[in-house]
Image (spheres, grey):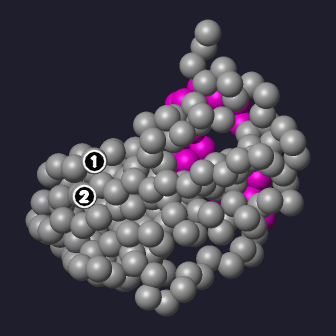
Amino acid sequence: MAPLENLNKYNIILASASPRRRQLLEQLGIDFSVKVIDGLDESYPAGLAWQVIPEYLSRKKAEGHSSLLTPSTMIITADTLVMLDGKPLGKPADAAEARLMLRNLSGRSHFVITGVTILTARKSTSFSTTTEVFFDSLTDDEIDFYITRFKPMDKAGAYGIQEWIGAAGIRRIEGSYYNVMGLPLHSLYTALGSF
């Protein structure tokens, strides 16, 4: 029996525009399509602990895509948050903001939390995974090189661990590498096995 053969009864939808999440989900060897409903509200209640924000938002995204559900549909949503000193680092608006984020991350550790929701007509489950990332000290030249070459304005925290900066600037991580890319594959694989 092939791994995750239990999923053959589902038309799986990845409700994410992220090319990295698409690439990561392909590594699990399952068939899926990508459908995204634009304009979903991604706000969260004030005072919500940062550790639970990504899981809350992944559930909210799944609920926002529930119009796609049929008895044979499975929807997978995710949300990733980069936290430094208890404050979220979203996607930078421009190169200047990316530069500021990377200077703040330089020589320090921060947390990356990804919340995931799996939704079918009969069942829903949500979970989150946290990884601590340790950056080496980065020079302004290294930061400028990375921003100019890789244009990380579409990434929370202004970096992608799978790019040059991950190889040159990240000293170590504690936790899931794939989580830092945007989808904690081991946790997702385990959860999918229960559907």
> Label 1 is placed on what type of residue?
Gly
CB under 8 Å between discs 2 and 1: yes
Residue in view at x 65 percent, y 69 percent: 60
Q: Is residue 42 magenta?
A: no
| Residue sitting at x 60%, y 13% | 2
| Residue placed most toward the observer, 168 or 78 | 78
Give above or below for 96 relative to 189: below
Quadrant including the C terminus:
top right
Q: Which residues are magenta?
A: 17-37
Q: How many marks?
A: 2
Quarter holding residue 186: top left
Q: Position of residue 86 (x, y in %)?
A: 29, 80
Q: Is residue 18 left or right of residue 61?
A: left
Q: Mark on residue 175? A: 1
Between residue 76 and residue 99, name the one nearer to us: 76
Residue sitting at x 78%, y 34%: 10
Q: Residue 79 in the image: x percent, y percent?
A: 53, 62
> Label 2 is placed on what type of residue?
Glu
Q: Measured along the vertical axis of the image, is residue 70 above or below residue 27?
A: below
Residue 93 appears anywhere in the view: yes
Tell me which numbered mark, 2 or 1, is placed earlier along the sequence: 2
Asked whether 31 falls inside the magenta stretch, the response is yes
Q: Which mark is residue 194?
A: none
Q: Which is nearer the eye, 103 or 81?
A: 81
Q: Secondary structure at mark 2?
A: strand
x then y, percent, for residue 49: 40, 78
Horizontal side of residue 79 vs 10, given as left or right: left
Q: Which secondary structure, mark 1?
A: loop
